[in-house]
Every structure is written in structure tokens, then in C-alpha cells.
Amino acid sequence: MDGEKSKKVLYIQIFGNKTENVEKAKKEIKEIAGDIVEFLPDVIFDKKIPSDISPYLNIKTDIVVPLFLGLDVEPFAYIKKPIILWTEGGYYGAWSKDLNSFLTLKGAEVYQFITPSEARETLKVLRTRKRMSKSKILYFGEMAGTTAHRDLSGVIGSDWNLERVKDVFGCIVKQIPMDYLLKEVDKVNLDSAKEEFKEWEDKVEDFGDISKDGYLEVVKFYLAMKKILKEQDADALTINCLSDLFKKKFITPCQALAKLNDEDIPAGCEGDLNALLTMMVFHYTTDTPSIMGNIYLFRPENGPGFPPPEVRVADAKEYLSQNKARFTHDVIPLRIAKSKYFLTTYHNSGKGITGYAELPKGEITVARIGPEANRMVITTAEIVEVEKSGHCSFSAYLKMKNLEEYLRQTSSIHNVITYGNHISEIKKLGKIMNLKVVEIG
């Protein structure tokens, strides 16, 4: 638990020459940042600051806050830690501008703020960067863009250069063979699954035609993934369900993925690595689950398959004229829903299990990290209507300011939504991570 907690908070170490000033700064930062920060033991220099302060740095330190009144400036330029120039209440401090310039010219990473809200936003995205850099991703199954097997192609618009993913985000990706996962599913103790099932059952409003024994199989799948996550000390996952899992065993992981997202474990489907990276950025910034889904310009079909071409074309014309799109998929984290689950078969196919829960209407942020993992397209939209649909369990109808340009700029059928407007935070994150953020307005 301590290791998991250490990833979720920023550890701040304050240097100063007066205890009362340090305590005042800690109180102000805590009031603004809340539980995203924790303080390590401060360092008080009664006299002249040493030329090398590295021996005084705590091994857990993420951020250094030097209260420069009475302290020499230059030693802080060489500590290779982000520096925050804190001034009264988190507001603009005129005397810190030159300090910022001096330290920046020396190569330090320095932040100062004009308002407390800017301070909180910056601390949030610094924490996001930390969480991304300390994350390990499990990829279950064949990697869609690295196999020569056409039948395993799946969604291929991700960055399959895992070293580049690590360079941008700091996280590592480990592939887990699907056969290994399925063997672990078979090993799950039935009594343990039945005990876990009690919690799942309580979150279902209506089982419909789904048998409880069938749902128990999904619970076993969830427990197997959790076991592997723990063994691998991993933080997020995606699974190549459509083009790998389903060819070996037809078991739909949708509800298992929803449960993991509710437990603060970003979990994506269809082996879409870049959709998962986008989910992680959103989740680590907002502390709430996000949803990946398809963006379509046509109505749902009540059953397997899609409407005929003439209907799709007519709908596309209408949707584009209204800046309206349909966002649809099968994984709904219950933490962001307004109801319990209504279970149904997968895409009204008569087999498999998915769940519908009502999603709130309102403002959302929509984004997708591009195929080289160094570019994110982002915009805001409004969910104006939500309905249970046949092909994919839910359809959320979005109104965008410039739908046509967003569709032109995004790189995949899969995009990710999170509730609220988080454009400013993500743009800040882009600057500190060298991630180009393309805002569509």
C-alpha cells in the first residue's frame, strides 16, 4: 500500500531559514493542493547555505520549495529536481521573477504562479507526470501492430515502438501471452470467485437473460487479471480481446475492465495502447475513470452489425451539419454512472456479457494520443443524450464545437472521454512532457 500511495502523491521538501516561514508555506500549499501532496521533513539553514545541498535531499523528494529569503540561489540550480518558487498564498511574487530566470538559465526546471488555481493545476500535472513515469502497463495478447498475422490485426493505430512510449511517458509496457492469462483463469478458486461475485451482484439492477453462472466466469477473468497485475507490480492494462482472446475463448472482459477502472486501474480493450495511454493521462489527472469508445456518425443498429450504407451516409450528412457524433462502447465504470448495471449479451449476439448503466449528461473532454505517442488531439464536447444501444451497450451523443476538424485530426476510431473541462491541465502537462497538444476549438 505504501508503494501504491507513493505513486499517487507528490512529496514536497521545503528549504528555508525560518521555521515559521516554512510552516506558513506548508499550510498554504496544503490548502491549495489538498491530498495530492505530502511534506517530507524540512531543511532549515540557520546560517549560510552549503554550495552542495544534494546531501540534504530526501530520497523520496519530488518537488523542492526553497524559501529564498536569506538563502543563496545558485545551489538549487544543480539538484535535478523540479523547483517551485512559492510566494505568499500562491499568488504572483514580483521578487521571484529574476530568480526564475536565473535558475532556468542554469538548466533547472522551475515553476512559479500568478494565482492559487494555477498552482493547484501545475501540481496536479506534475503528479500526472510522476504517475505516468512510474507506471507499468500489461498488454494481454498479441500486439496488433507487431504481428504479421492478418487475423490478429485488430486496431493498429497505436505506437508499437515501446521505447518511444517510454521516452515520452516514462512508463514501461510488458506483453503477457493470452494463453498464460487463460491458464490463470482456469486456476481461479471457485469459492473465491463466488465470494467476489457477491459484490458484483449488488451492482446489478437487472440480469436480463444473463445467467449468474455466466457472470461468474467474468468474475474469474477479473480475478486472474488482478493476480497477474499484482505479480507484475503493474498499474494499467489493455487486452486484445477482439482479435486474440475471442479466437481462443469467447469470454467478454467488458465488465471486468469496468471493475478495474473503478478501482483506479486504467484498463482498456481491443489492445489499443494509445487509447490506454490517453485513459491513464485523464485518470491520473482527474482521479476519476475515463471511457474509451468509438466515434460514429450514424445511428446504432439493434443487434449485431451496422445500418446499411445508405443510412450511414444520410446520417453522416445530418450529424456533420449539427456537429453531432455518437460515442459508443461497452465498458462503463460504475463510479461515473447514475445507475446500476442492466446486463445484456454482447452486441445482442446471444452470447457474452456487457452491461449498460446510465451516464450523466454534461461537459466532457475528448482526446486521443496519436500514433507516435508524442501528440494528443483534444477538445471539449457536451453529452446531450445517452441511450442503451444494441451494437455496443451504450451510445452517448456528443455536440462538439468543430466536429469535422476533430475527426480530421484524430488518429483512430477509438477516442477517450472524461467528465469536465480539462484542456488547461492537459496543455500544461504537454509542455512539461514534450507532448504536443492540439486543441480543436
Image: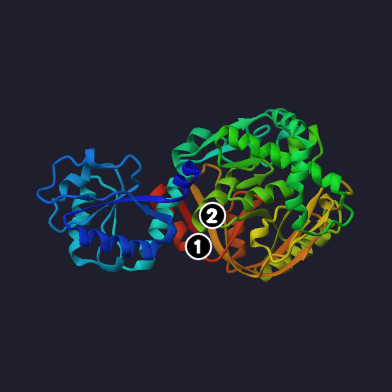
Badge 2 density bin: few <14, some 14–19, many ≥20, Cα 10 Å: many
Q: In this rendering, is residue 250 above or below 119? A: above
> Of residues 392 and 264, which is closer to you in this image?
264
Residue type indicated by callout 1: His
Residue type indicated by callout 2: Phe
Residue position marked by numbered label 1 in the rendering: 422
286 lies left or right of 200: left
Badge 1 density bin: few <14, some 14–19, many ≥20, Cα 10 Å: some
Quadrant position of residue 120: bottom left
Q: In this rendering, is residue 302 above or below 103? A: below
Q: In this rendering, is residue 173 above or below 326? A: above
Instruction: Name the spot of residue 19 as percent of width and height, x first.
Output: 20, 58
Does residue 106 appear in this view?
Answer: no
- Residue at point 38% right, 53% down? 38
Residue 432's label in the rendered image is: none
Residue position marked by numbered label 2 in the rendering: 282
Q: Are marks 2 and 1 in contact (CB under 8 Å)?
A: yes
- For marks 2 and 1, the one nearer the N-term is 2
Instruction: Name the spot of residue 130 as percent of width and height, x first.
Output: 43, 46
> Of residues 75 and 16, which is closer to you in this image?
16
Q: Residue furthest left?
A: 48
Instruction: Name the spot of residue 299 as percent of width and height, x first.
Output: 78, 62
Quadrant position of residue 343: bottom right
Gap between marks 2 and 1 measured at Cα: 8 Å
Q: How many numbered circles does the render carry? A: 2
303 lies left or right of 276: right
